[in-house]
Amino acid sequence: MTDKIEREISIQAPIATVWEVITKPEYISQWFGSQAEIDLRRGGKGKLSWGEDFEAPLEIVEVDKPHLFSFLWVAPDEETKPTHQQTLVEFRLTEDGAETKVCLTESGFEILEITAEQKANLIAKHTPGWSDFLSKLQRCAQNIPTKA
């Protein structure tokens, strides 16, 4: 079993646009959750919400505009939420001509204090979830008019 999830996509948008879509609450709420609050600085706190019952508190780990954004979060899953255990989510952005390459990694599953079966279930849930969120991120970024 792998202890991390890795996904990569290319987005037909400038890196500055993709950075804003990944880090600004007004855009995050369009592709990742229904509401987002973020204090965009190292050590800053935030929260992602999916309706009233699903919330994920987070803490910003790294902000290196426009190339790296990472945070620790307590995903709203039954395996992690009750014990407030965190995994690390990283977005790495690279300019590639007119496109922006986004590499997403969620790691830290191996240090969660849950059973191997619970870890496998968590990874199995998050893997297609990230694919879905990245597709939404891609659509969101590509629909923002670029500034001339």
Image (cartoon, rainbow, N blue to C red):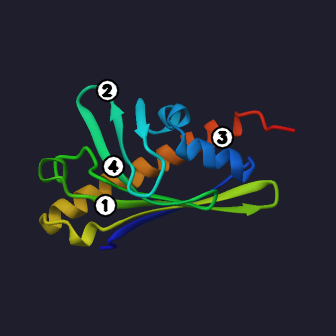
Instruction: State the CA–CA distance, disc 1 to disc 4.
Output: 10 Å
Disc 3 marks which amino acid? Ala
Give the labeled residue for mark 2.
51
Q: Is residue 33 something that shows in the picture? A: no
Instruction: State the CA–CA distance, disc 4 to disc 2.
Output: 17 Å
Asked if 55 appears above or below 45 in the picture, the reply is: above
Q: Residue at x 26, y 51 (%)?
A: 74
User: Which tag, 4 or 2, sits closer to the chain's start?
Assistant: 2
Contact? badges 1 and 2 (CB < 8 Å): no
Q: Which mark is residue 141?
A: 3
| Mark 2 surroundings within 10 Å by alpha-carbon count, few (fewer than 14), some (14 through 19), many (20 or more) | few
Give the labeled residue for mark 4.
58
Give the labeled residue for mark 1.
87
User: Which tag, 3 or 4, sits closer to the chain's start?
Assistant: 4
Contact? badges 3 and 1 (CB < 8 Å): no
Asked if 51 appears above or below 45 in the picture, the reply is: above
User: Which tag, 3 or 2, sits closer to the chain's start?
Assistant: 2
| Mark 1 surroundings within 10 Å by alpha-carbon count, few (fewer than 14), some (14 through 19), many (20 or more) | some
Q: Considering the numbered disc 3 on the image, is that residue within a helix, a strand or a loop?
A: helix
User: Which tag, 1 or 2, sits closer to the chain's start?
Assistant: 2
Asked where in the image residue 42 lies, by quadrant, the reply is bottom left
Q: Is residue 144 left or right of residue 98?
A: left
